[in-house]
Structure formats: C-alpha cells, structure tokens
Image: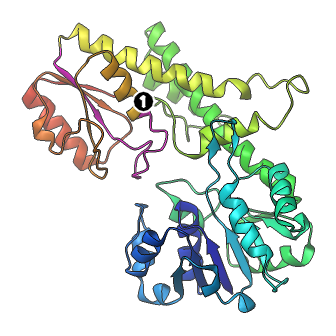
Amino acid sequence: MNLVVIGTGYVGLVTGVGFASLGNKVSFIDLDKNKIVKLQNKEIPIFEPGLEEHFQNEDTFSRMSFTSSYDDVKWDSTDVAFVCVQTPNNFETNSVDTRFLESAISEISQLDNSKIVVTVKSTIPPYEIEKVCKKVGMDKNEITFNPEFLREGTAIEDFFKPDRIVIGGNDPEKLTVLKELYKSFEAEVIETDPISSQLIKYLANTYLPLRLSFVNEAARLIDYSGGNQKDVLKGVGLDSRIGSHYFRPSPAWGGSCFPKDLIEVNNFYNDGAITLPLISNIIDSNIQQTTWTVEKLIKIFNENSLTSIVLIGAAFKEDTDDLRNSPTLDIYRMLEDKEIKTQIYDEMVELDSYDSIEDLNNIADKSLVALMYPVKKQLMEKIESVISKTGSILYTPW
C-alpha cells in the first residue's frame, strides 16, 4: 500500500519504517525541516534498538521519502494516512494539547481524495478529536483510530510482534482497508468503535503505572519491615494470577506517555460523576516514590560518610535516550537542593545542564553509586570494578 506518516517521533518513525520494511511505500511528513534533512541523509534523530538496522536497509530506504511539505505528497495514490503527531499535556489547562493534531487534520481535510483512510495513532480522547474535526470542518466519522502500544526500548519488536492490533471507527470500508494492511501480522485484531479503541489505549496506560506503583509501594513496605525484597516479590510474582512481568521496583516511573495519559484519564469524567480512588492517586504514589528514593539515598550517604552520589542512567528507562519525565533528573535536582554533590553517568545521553561524568574512572572515592535501572553486563562489570577501587557503595532499588 501507499502510506503517509505524519510525525517522525518514536511512534511515526517506528511505524513508517516498519511498514516500509514489509514492502509498503511510505511518505513521512514532519514540519521540523532539520529532522527531515537528517532523515534524508540517513540520520535517525532518536535512539531505538533495532530501528537503525531497518532504516539503513537499502530496499527499505528506497521505499521511503521525507518532506516537510504536504504538497510534496502524492495524495491521489495514498491509501492510508497515519497521524502520529505528539499530543502533550498542556500544564496550564491540565488537558491534552491538540495543536499538532489539529494542524495535521486541517491539512488532510483539504484533500480531494475522500478514499484515504485517515488513521489517528496519536493518543487523544474521543471527545477531543470530535472538537478538532468540528473546528477544521471534517466529519468525525471519517476518522479511524489505530492506537499504538510501542514501548521505548522494544518498539521494533512490539511493531512486528504486537500483543494485539486495535482499530476503531464508524466506516466499515475504511476499517477493512486497515485490516488488509495488517493481515500479515500474527495478532488478534480488535475492531471496535472510536471511543472503545481509545479507552483500550488509555486504560492500558493506566494499569501499567498502577502496577509499577504497586510494586514500588510494596518495596517500601518490605524495606520498612526488614524483609528480603527479592524473595518477597518473587513469591508474589510466581502467582499465575499476578505474574512477574513488569513487576520490578524502581526509583519511580516516568516517560512521555504514562504521566500525560493518567492526567487525561482523570479528565474523562466530571468531579462527583464517578469515583476512581485507585486511578486518581497513581501519580501521587509515584511522586511519593521519588521522594522516598531520595530519602533512602541520603540515609545511605550520611550513614557511610560518603563524598558524592552518582546516578547511573539519565533516561527514564533502559535502552532509550528519552529524558522526558525522567526520575533520574528529578532525583538529581532534589539531591542538589539538599546540597549533596550529585553527578549523572549515561553512555548515550549528553547532559549539558547537569553535572555529569563522561568516564566511570572519574568517580570520586567513597561515592554512592545508584543504578536508576538495570544496565547491561559489560557496564555492570565496569561499575563493580570502579566501586572496588574507590571504596564506593552500590545501590539498586530492585
């Protein structure tokens, strides 16, 4: 098929490159001209394991084109247009920011090709897309939804081997086109209405941080009680009804999706209409975890008369360079406020605004080395070697 992908962030690039590698022709649109120039020169502006290999494949690259102008796209032969623009949280209004989505839908609404399947991959509440369509003069029933479930760090694997494929819409013919596009994927396709398709995405992104927050609270309780964290969590996770996947304590969870999606879920309903005590307190639990982690680090630091704290890993999780809502950066600022010398070490991320260490051998004697998330074996061996030489102490939250 001939596809258009609007937006070249994590979702847009992985989706477009993935479909191109499967034989489809993909035209990427992004208003950021610098990103387009990089992509045209075979430079990927983000790090995602496995993406580079697919992107650089000559056959795959030959099926892709990149532009910052809607006029450059052959719309008359386009089958599906994926809208993959960012939908960040507007912290002034505490609601989703639809500017980028509105811009994309507005451009598409002016096209003559009514057969194009306009598919929104951006996470957006159904009532917001209705407002956007009304504002730009487009029938909301022409829009289809295909929410993404790509995890940063494993997005390529998630694209090719999804747990499920969700498509939503009110036009059976357009949904048939999407099902045809996905026919080679070995995953159950859930065909549903627009509201339900988006609720699947939002509630998945509600349950996951809820689960992470639970295991973090459990870790705090185990620490307070003097239990063996590894044994307790293993014993709980071996229950087949619970499972051990996504059941690892952390300094806190972060990223671009969970925080904004949780905020939006809590905007779905009017105060007093329904009560959701679990959902409404997930973010607060995460904030408390960050505070607890800082207090834990300070306690170890003081009890052992250490000289500095080194946080290993700047991104919000392993195998990514994404700093959005990174717990590491929050913890760094909180420790700095306590006037404790704090540094960050990360192999992939440049940190101009933070005191960072480029070489592990520069770690000061008697430091507290805190792993923000699991690291690969080779890096762990380096860390252990430096710790043994400097008389430092290692801290991991799991």
Which element is circle 1 on? helix
Quadrant location of residue 165? bottom right
Left/right of residue 47 with respect to residue 364 in the rendered view = right
In front of the other: 346 or 319: 346
Left/right of residue 321 with respect to residue 238 in the rendered view = left
* Relative to 268, residue 173 above or below: below
Quadrant location of residue 148? bottom right
Residue 53: percent from the left, percent from the top?
40, 74
Q: In the rendered image, which residue does mark 1 sit on?
A: 330
Residue 338: percent from the left, percent from the top?
32, 15
Residue 145: percent from the left, percent from the top?
78, 63
Q: Give the quarter of the figure containing the C terminus.
A: top left
Q: Give the quarter of the figure containing the N terminus.
A: bottom right
* Relative to 218, residue 136 above or below: below
Q: Residue at x 73, y 45 (%)?
A: 202
Q: Residue at x 31, y 22 (%)?
A: 336
User: For the residue marked with disc 1, what is the amino acid?
Assistant: Asp
- Overall secondary structure of the magenta stretch? loop
Left/right of residue 153 with respect to residue 103 in the rendered view = left
Residue 163 showing in the rendered view: no
Q: Is residue 239 magenta?
A: no
* Relative to 95, residue 78 above or below: below
Tell me if mark 1 has few (under 14), some (14-19) or many (20+) residues whose alpha carbon lies within 10 angstroms of its own. Answer: some
What segment carries the magenta color? 306-327
Residue 311 showing in the rendered view: yes
* Relative to 5, residue 302 above or below: above
Left/right of residue 210 with respect to residue 365 in the rendered view = right
